[in-house]
Amino acid sequence: MLAKVKSFGLQGIEGYPIDVEVDVSNGLPHFEIVGLADTSIKEAKERVRSAIKNSAYDYPIRRITVNLAPADIKKEGSLYDLAIAIGILSTDEENKIQNEKDYVYIGELSLDGSLKKVKGILPLLISARGEGYKKFIIPKENEKEASFVEGIIVYGVNSLDETIKFLRGDLKLEQVQECKYDQIKKENANRGLDFCHVKGQAMAKRALEIAAAGGHNLLMIGPPGSGKSMLAKCFPSILPDMTFEEALEVTKIHSIAGELDLNDGIVTQRPFRSPHHTATIVALIGGGTHSKPGEISLADHGVLFLDEFPEYSKQLIETLRQPLEDGVITVARNKATITYPANFTLIASMNPCPCGNYGRKDKECHCSASQISKYLSRISGPIMDRIDIHIEVDSVTYDQLKSEDTEEKSATIKERVNRARQTQLDRYKNDKNYSNAKMSVTQVKKYCKLDNTSELLLRRAFESLNLSARAHDRILKVARTIADLEGCENIEASHIAEAISYRTLDRKYWK
């Protein structure tokens, strides 16, 4: 007898429908799974057999063949267990299962028949909804995550037995209630350190505020102990609140990676990832045997902080070129080519030389010219060109450290950042864009028009600093953000001048 039920598979952050076809026929007892299934799926036959028996249902001692169609796509994971078990039990009329074809089944079975959580529920449900599927049966532990998908009917179950009784009509289940994002959204101000604890560093704070407001990449150069790492750790406290669309995209990635807090069900705070400089290229950009998302994807719509920037391998740093420009990373492997979002803000910090004292007046630098050159050369010109804001962070003086003056709190800065980001969301509402940093060339021409004075100022800087076309556009984007922070509709000469001032350090150190 043949039975067909529906499940869904994952490729990157997109799901695709899977027909789970189960044929139970006469012959020697045998269980075979076909359809380009990986080891974890082939092992499902042992999980399914035990789950059915331990749930007090008759397991057919016959020839069982399971096909996962389409058969030309590689399938991974344990999320098909429930669908396979339902398909097998549906072939026995004595089980009186009804309407099994109305649902999409997702879940991993334990040997005792209980249902375990799986990764990637949110992207699976969103993709399935887009394909026209409306009813789903998923593990109880994944209910919270599923509650943020609108327009579908979802039932969370604890076990295979509970699922069968529900399909028979012997058990009534409560539908998962939709949850509104605004009800559970948390404030970023509670994260990390507060800027009020940072003495001095007014220029660095200003630059970080601009970076947060517009999503701009930023590089801090300064001696050891000047506060670069502390400033970066304060940065999450002023990041703008995430929109629901941003939160969904971030949650998809964290769900696939298995890093989602199931109690919340959705990521409400912008990610802040800080991998060690010994991280591998695969760990940073993603990939591996199962093409998992890397740190740059886990930092999507958030921050990737690279402390001691030159200490990372040159090859690893160069891999950031394409995602910094395009906002996505395409991982190509023998088995699959997968594209993950990588729309992150890069915050990097570094010393000016190996000893850290190059250019200081109070301490002598012991590095030779060749050592300094070799150290700085680890950061290439193309990478510097993709970083919008370059700032120098000087050491804090004793008087600044002991000053009783009250520093501005992160909450106050964040209010300005939120206003500026809302201006951008309103501006780009029809362009599927969330920040000034991600403006296209067409949008730059449309939204960054200059008056004659500003145009002349930018022309002089372009020629005297020998800027690239990319640097020209990035100056305009930063100027647009500065204008948004000040509530100005048009970019003024003062905004251009400040934006240009953030593009001069590479001329000082990388001569």
Image (tube, rainbow, N blue to C red):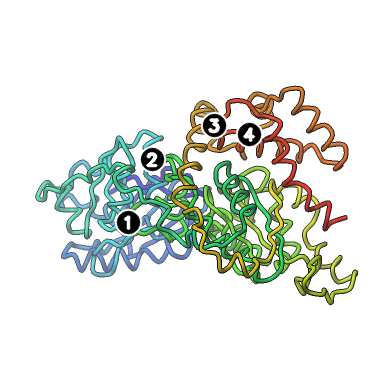
Precedes in sequence: disc 2 or disc 3:
2
Amino acid type of the residue that numbered disc 3 sits on in the rendered structure: Gly
Residue under the point 26% across and 53% down: 86
Q: Does dot 2 land on a helix, a strand or a loop?
A: helix
Amino acid type of the residue that numbered disc 1 sits on in the rendered structure: Gly
Q: Which mark is residue 107?
A: 1
Q: CA distance from mark 2 to mark 4?
A: 39 Å
Find residue 437 and report its horizontal and vertical position in percent: 62, 40
Q: Does dot 1 land on a helix, a strand or a loop?
A: loop
Which of 423 and 248 lies nearest the eye of the viewer?
A: 423
Amino acid type of the residue that numbered disc 4 sits on in the rendered structure: Arg
Tell me, yes or no, whether the two marked residues, 1 and 4, touch with CB atoms within 8 Å: no
Q: Determine which quarter of the picture holds residue 216.
A: top right
Q: Does dot 4 land on a helix, a strand or a loop?
A: helix
Which residue is denoted by mark 4 in the rendering? 480
Which residue is denoted by mark 2 in the rendering? 128
Find residue 96 and report its horizontal and vertical position in percent: 14, 48
Q: CA distance from mark 2 to mark 1?
A: 15 Å
Local crowd at mark 2 within 10 Å, few (<14), some, or many (≥20)?
many
Residue under the point 80% across and 53% down: 506
Tell me, yes or no, whether the two marked residues, 3 and 4, touch with CB atoms within 8 Å: no
